[in-house]
C-alpha cells in the first residue's frame, strides 16, 4: 500500500475507525493529523470492542508505528489513560510517536469550552473537551506545544504569562474560579516526563517509511462537513478533517499522497447543532438510530439520523479530491422496503447545483429524493461485493453515478472480516 489518506465524507462518526483498522494492516505507519479527544473510533478485534479517542487506530496492531501529528491537540491525561487501558487489555500494541509541534489541551481550555458554549446563543453542541479553545490559542499564538513542555523553564515562564490572561477571562468574563499556577505547572511537568520518550518528528517518520517502499495511512477524525473551512460553519469543529489537513497536520507535502478515500455511512448522521437537510424526524430516523447504534462514542449523545445525502457527498468528493468511497453500515439498511437518496437541494424555486455556503440557505432547502427498492436478505455474512443482493449493488452503483466516486470498500458489520474490497488495486 502506498500513501493513503482516509477522511470522513459526512459529519463525522462515519465508521472511519473500522476502515482505518482494516487498512492499517497493510501500512507500516498510521498517522492521526487533526482533532483531539473529541473524536471516538470504535474498533472491534476478535469480538472485543476498543474505543479510541486520541490514539491512532493502528495502535491495536503489534509493532505498528502510530503517529500523533502536529495538527492534533493532545490532552495528556486522556492519552495516558488510553494507553494504560490498552496495556491492561493487549500484551503488545503499536509503537507510539508524538510530534513535538502538537499543541496541548490545558485545563483552562476545557473550562472555557464549556463556559463559551453556555454563553453562546446558537449552541454548537461541542464535546466540551477543550478542542476549540486549544486551536484558538494555537492560531492566536498563545498555545503551548509538546516541545515547549519538554523545556521545564521555558514552559513555566510561558504558562505564567498565558495563565495570567486566562484567569482574567475566567474570573471577569465568566465569574469562574481562577486556576492555581503552581498546581498546573506541577501537573503538566509530570505529563512532560511521560510524553518525552514518545516524541519524534512525524514528517521524518513518514518520508523514511515511504522511501523504504512501505505503506503509510493518514487517519482523519471528524468529517468533511465539520471542517473549519469547508464545513457547515460555525457548526463545525476547529480543525481541518479534509484531505489537505493531512499535509499540514503531519508535515508532509501533497505530492507524497497517492490515494484519498472518503468514508461514508450508507445513510447520514450528525451530532451537535447545525443544519442537516436529509434529517428524519419520524420512525425511520428512530429505526436507523436503533439498528445502527447511533449514539456518540465520546459523549453518548443520540445521533441525528437521515437518508443518504448525495449532494453533500458530491461536495465531499470535490473538496477532498476523493479517489473512491468506503461505504459502511450497509447492513443497517437491510429490511427497509424503499430507500431514499437525496439527489438535489431546492431553495425557493431554484435547484442548487452545489452545497450552499450560507447556513440560512442550507437550513431552508428542501431535498429532492430518488427512491430505490431495498433488500431483505441478511448481508452481514456476505464477503464479496458480487455476493450482495442485486438491490444493494444497485444502491451502491447509483451512489457512484451521483457522486462521481467509485466505491472501493463496503462495510456490512462491525468486525474486520465484514469489510468487502470492491477495488482489486486498493492495496497496490
Ligand atoms: P468540538 O469539536 O468538540 O468543538 O465540537 C464541534 C462540533 O463538532 C459539535 O457539533 C460536535 O458534536 C462535532 N464533533 C466533534 N467531534 C466529532 C466527532 O468525532 N464526530 C462527530 N461529531 C463531532
Image (cartoon, grey):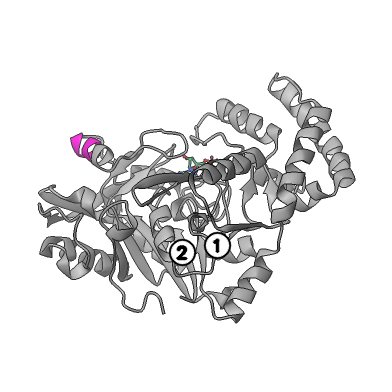
**Residue 325 image position (x, y, % from top left):** 35, 65
Could you tell me how far apart the alpha carbons at marks 1 and 2 are, in whole angstroms? 12 Å
Q: How many marks can you see?
A: 2
Q: Is residue 354 visible?
A: no
**Classed neighbour count for the residue bearing mark 2: other residues with Cα under 10 Å, few (<14), some (14–19), many (≥20):** many
**Residue 114 image position (x, y, % from top left):** 59, 29
Quick check: is the Cβ at mark 2 less than 8 Å away from ligand 1?
no
Q: Is residue 197 left or right of residue 236?
A: right
The quadrant holding residue 342 is bottom left
Residue visible at 11% across and 55% down in the picture = 375
Front residue of 247 and 98: 98
Quick check: is the Cβ at mark 1 less than 8 Å away from ligand 1?
no
Q: Is residue 407 above or below residue 13?
A: below
Q: Is residue 318 left or right of residue 169?
A: left
Q: Main secondary structure of the magenta part?
A: helix
| Residue 224 included in the magenta stretch of the image | no
In the rendered structure, which segment of residues is drawn in magenta? 283-287
The quadrant holding residue 417 is bottom left
The residue under label 1 is 63
Front residue of 279 and 359: 279
**Residue 106 image position (x, y, % from top left):** 70, 37
> Where the C terminus falls, by quadrant?
bottom left
Q: Is residue 17 visible?
A: yes
Considering only order in the chain, which callout, 2 or 1, is on the residue closer to the N terminus? 2
Residue visible at 71% across and 61% down in the picture = 200
**Residue 30 image position (x, y, % from top left):** 53, 63
Q: Is residue 98 above or below residue 189?
A: below
Front residue of 267 and 83: 83
The residue under label 2 is 24
Amino acid at each position: 500500500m502506498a500513501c493513503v489518506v482516509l477522511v470522513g465524507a459526512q459529519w463525522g462518526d462515519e465508521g472511519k475507525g473500522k476502515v482505518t483498522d482494516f487498512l492499517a494492516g497493510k501500512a507500516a505507519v498510521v498517522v492521526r493529523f487533526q482533532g483531539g479527544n473529541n473524536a471516538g473510533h470504535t474498533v472491534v478485534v476478535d469480538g472485543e470492542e476498543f474505543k479510541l479517542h486520541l490514539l491512532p487506530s493502528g495502535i491495536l496492531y503489534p509493532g505498528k508505528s502510530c503517529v500523533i501529528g502536529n495538527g492534533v491537540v493532545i490532552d495528556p491525561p486522556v492519552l495516558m489513560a488510553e494507553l494504560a487501558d490498552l496495556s491492561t487489555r493487549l500484551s503488545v500494541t503499536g509503537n507510539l510517536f508524538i510530534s513535538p509541534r502538537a499543541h496541548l489541551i490545558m485545563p483552562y481550555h476545557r473550562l472555557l469550552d464549556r463556559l463559551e458554549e453556555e454563553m453562546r446563543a446558537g449552541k454548537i453542541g461541542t464535546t466540551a473537551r477543550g478542542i476549540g479553545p486549544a486551536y484558538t490559542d494555537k492560531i492566536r499564538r498563545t498555545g503551548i506545544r509538546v516541545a515547549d513542555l519538554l523545556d521545564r523553564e521555558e514552559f513555566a515562564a510561558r504558562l505564567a504569562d498565558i495563565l495570567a490572561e486566562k484567569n482574567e477571562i475566567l474570573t471577569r468574563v465568566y465569574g469562574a474560579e481562577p486556576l492555581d499556577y503552581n498546581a498546573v505547572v506541577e501537573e503538566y511537568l509530570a505529563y512532560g516526563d511521560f510524553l518525552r520518550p514518545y516524541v519524534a518528528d512525524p514528517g521524518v517518520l513518514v518520508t523514511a517509511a515511504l522511501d523504504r517502499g512501505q505503506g503509510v495511512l493518514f487517519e482523519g477524525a471528524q468529517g468533511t462537513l465539520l471542517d473549519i473551512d469547508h464545513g457547515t460553519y460555525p457548526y463545525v469543529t476547529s480543525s481541518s478533517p479534509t484531505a489537505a489537513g493531512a499535509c499540514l497536520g503531519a508535515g508532509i507535502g501533497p505530492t507524497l499522497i497517492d490515494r484519498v478515500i472518503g468514508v461514508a455511512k450508507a445513510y447520514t448522521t450528525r451530532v451537535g447543532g447545525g443544519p442537516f437537510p436529509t434529517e428524519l424526524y419520524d420512525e425511520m430516523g428512530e429505526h436507523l438510530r436503533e439498528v445502527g447504534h447511533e449514539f456518540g462514542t465520546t459523549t453518548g449523545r443520540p445521533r441525528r439520523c437521515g437518508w443518504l445525502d448525495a449532494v453533500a457527498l458530491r461536495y465531499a468528493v470535490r473538496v477532498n479530491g476523493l479517489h473512491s468511497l468506503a461505504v459502511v453500515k450497509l447492513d443497517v439498511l437491510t429490511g427497509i422496503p424503499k430507500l431514499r437518496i437525496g439527489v438535489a437541494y431546492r431553495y425557493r424555486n431554484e435547484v442548487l447545483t452545489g452545497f450552499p455556503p450560507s447556513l440560512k440557505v442550507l437550513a431552508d432547502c428542501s431535498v429532492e429524493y430518488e427512491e430505490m427498492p431495498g433488500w431483505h436478505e441478511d448481508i452481514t455474512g456476505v464477503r464479496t461485493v458480487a455476493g450482495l443482493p442485486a438491490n444493494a449493488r444497485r444502491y451502491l452503483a447509483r451512489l457512484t453515478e451521483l457522486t462521481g466516486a467509485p466505491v472501493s470498500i463496503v462495510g456490512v458489520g462491525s468486525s474486520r472480516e465484514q469489510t468487502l474490497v470492491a477495488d482489486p488495486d486498493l492495496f497496490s
